[in-house]
Image (cartoon, coloured by chain):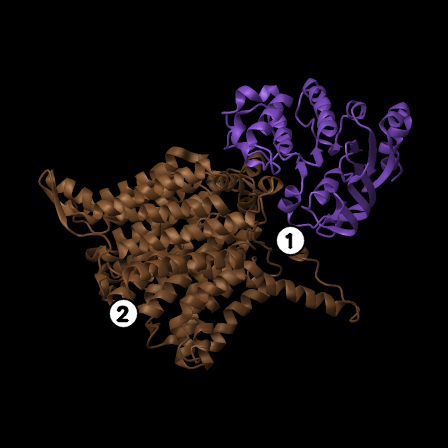
Amino acid sequence: MKDVLLFAILGTGAGAVYAMIAMGIVLIQKGTGAVNFAQGAIAGACAIYFGVSTGNDGTPLVQAALTAVLAAGLGGLIFYVLVMRPLRNAPLLARIVTTLGLMLAVQGLASQVWKVPTVIAPAIFPTDSIDVFGINFGVDRLYLLGTAVVLTTVLWAVYRFTRFGMATRAVAENEQGAALLGYSPDVIGAVNWMLGSMLAALAGVLFAPITALNISTLSLLVVPALAAALVGRFNSFGLTTFVAVLIGVVQSILTRFVTQPGINDALPFVLIVLVMIASGALIPGRGTREVSRLPLAPAVKGRAVPLTLIGVVPVIGLLTLGSTYRDAISTSLVMIILALSVVIVTGFVGQISLMQMAFAGIAAFVVSKLAVEMGIPFPLPILIAGIVVVPIGILLGLPALRVRGISLAVVTLGAAVAISSFVFGNSAWTGGADGSKVPAPELFGWSVDAVAHPARFGIFAALVTVALVAGVMNIRLSSLGRRMLAVRSNERAAAAAGINVSMTKLQAFALSAFVAGIGGGVLGYQIGAVAFTRFVPIASISLLALVYIGGVATVYGAVTAGILANGGVLYVLLTSVDGISSWWIVLSGVLLMFNAVVQPDGIAVALRQQAGWVASRVRRDPGSDARPSADVPAAARL
Amino acid sequence: MTAAIEMRDVSAGYAGVPVLRGVDLHVSTGEVVALLGGNGAGKTTTLLTLAGILPSEAGDVRALGEPVRAGRPHVQARRGIALVPDDRSLFFNLTTRENLRLARTPKGTSHADVEALVLDYFPALKPKLGVRAGLLSGGEQQMLAVGRAMVTQPKVLMIDELSMGLAPIVVTQMLPIVRRIAVELGAGVLLVEQHIDLVLQHSDRAYVLNRGRVVLEGTAADLLADKAQLRSSYLAMEVAS
């Protein structure tokens, strides 16, 4: 019993930190309707800055803390003005993906600047231990909890009683209505972004002395914080803080009594799912024009030529180029497959999934088991793995029947974290850091080994890619594709038109998981040893980011994503520039934000529109200067 | 009487689709003017242009003597130009009192005074002050929307579809109150309405829009007296085209 209490008290420290990050999320959601997935990364970067500058460089504590908090506030302001403000009425997906881009950028930047520092940050609060009812613990936990409670009370009072607070609630509900009363949504949005970022920074600074300063793990602080904010419905500060502290406490107790690794990380996910199922459709969206534009999903005109190009161009490259490019082409092809899975579930049906790499990872480990332990010959394990992942996809797609938009993104991120630490983190099953071996593939006595015969493996990957691209093109043109697009644009209208919305969503999750599974299987054979680090949540986020940059609702977006991918063709082309490879993740984050603002439909759709414009110029009188009329060419085919 | 709002040869529309084509219109202070017309005539577009939500493509849009800059509706609101849009734009999660408190009072007036004034106009809101706006009936919501606009003591009040979703008896109660606002606050009032007879009885003048043009204008009395002309201005162009 004493142990339970002790670990409960110890857990309040982390819980208080979750609470501060979560309150920042609530502020930003109230003020701008966006959910900031980068809160954890901001907290993490500030924690590391604080640790390094005080521990290594000897900066005074207060100065370092103030610098971190003010810098985060300034960063939040700049981010709002440059990125979120232009996106105020953009599709929900654009806003979500943009904060994911910020997360990538901050995380990449922090790991570039500070690597993984070994320094331990000096304590901010007194660390004397006190004895209460025979339980001995550090008094700093009480200070942390007290800070969270005070902040909660202050924020509650400000948002309840002040005009600014009321105006923020008003803007969250109806932006135009607030403007008609004389409130500038920009000012309110900017102030809330600033305050939210500063809260994250404060959380990071206070957490620094009691945690490991690793940006990858600190970025994921956003998951328990999101869980708490979601239970508080992005509205109640008190409930949010209570749930956040509760998560911290229960996680702490679990670490004491349960030896199964990863159980802590699974807990927020379980909590999210339970709350979602219980509260169903009541989760808040945004009061304003939620029916805003969706990313274009142009139908494919003429499949033969693009399919031939997608098949033939890589093969020519594989047969003529050097080994570096051969590997890059294979990597791009695998990424195209994985990206196609995002196109189906997020592009066509609008369900934001941040767990696609988890499907791929499960498939890769299944391939390893099938090939090594059961001796099933290549390429059958890939197909079997794809099929094995389907029920998992359906199972994890179930929350999507009752949960939409931002909440679904949170649920799927939670699922990714849970799978990553609960399944992949289980070294008995996945072989730990060394990973699980996958034997060199062989087909009819021919070696298709990615290392020994990269061209042969690449050709195999190209065949699979072409088949799946053709499949996804066919889905888009089939009645299933039309049902998917109908569900995406308006569930109620789709249901009124006789479409089984639930079935359509589950079909999408099933198909998407299958494609992701095939991608994971091919990837398994390509890399030879499946290490779980490839399938961590950040990989799923990067994948969605890449596909969004390419164009989330078209196969060409997937192809673009493959070309842009880390280790892919463009990456290898650009790594001739010195040092760019280590900045790749920062670049992709920045590119993501930039692209969301200037080209929300993705590069592939923009290129097609430009091509259409050029074609119309060529057909017409060359002197005429008719511009393409906005999005009409592609939209007309929607 | 000075012009509260004024449009000269104004054209406006959405994404290149023209809606208003060369509209001339003015409302003086203390005057109630009705803006009539069928669906798609451009009534709401006119109000959005005047409120600074929608940019005009050509022509001169002025409110209280100054040009209206589009894209910054909150600036217009602070100058005393109030729009009650057709969706009423209430904040459903806030209480009736909070909705009223959100509106800014002019300098030198206390919120308590203004709130008392609003409750004087709309006594039905008194027992509902602590109730969330989302739980009010349609009529009460409309009263709150108009009342909230009144808190700012506007010099221009524009109401889009006052009668939408309301029982005729509620509308007949509200229109005299709108007239009172014009007289007591000296505001220029522009009413968009579908109930022609009803609104003309409470207006000074009216404009009839058809396909983005003013096809008829005159005093309310004249228009009521010559119903045939009014009807033809509504229908003739649609039939002819």
Question: Could you give the CA–CA distance between mark 1 and mark 2, rounded to whole angstroms?
Answer: 56 Å
Near-viewer residue (B223 or A429) = B223
Near-viewer residue (A239 or A414) = A239
Quarter location, residue A463: bottom left
Secondary element under disc 2, as helix, strand or loop, is loop
- A219 above or below A309? above
Query: Furthest-left residue in view?
Result: A134
Q: Three-letter amino acid code at disc 2?
A: Asp
The answer to whether one can see residue A265 in this image is yes
The answer to whether one can see residue A438 in this image is no
The colour one sees for chain B in the rendered image is: purple
Horizontal placement of A637 versus A124: left or right? Answer: right
Pinpoint residue A636: horizontal percent, then vertical percent.
Answer: 67, 52
Secondary element under disc 1, as helix, strand or loop, is helix
Q: Which chain did the image draw in brown?
A: A
Q: Which mark is residue A57?
A: 2
Pinpoint residue A624: horizontal percent, then vertical percent.
Answer: 79, 67
Q: Which residue does the image show at 91% across and 29% down from the upper left?
A: B229
Q: Which residue does the image show at 51% across and 49% down from the upper left?
A: A189
Q: Three-letter amino acid code at disc 1?
A: Ala
N-terminal-most mark, 1 or 2:
2
- A16 above or below A562? above
- Chain for numbered disc 1: A
Q: Name the quarter where the N terminus of chain A is drawn.
A: top left
Horizontal placement of A626 versus A5: left or right? Answer: right
Near-viewer residue (B172 or A1) = B172
Quarter location, residue A338: bottom left
Horizontal placement of B74 versus A517: left or right? Answer: right
Q: Which residue is mark 1?
A: A635
Circle 1 crowding by C-alpha within 10 Å: few under 14, some 14–19, many from 20: few
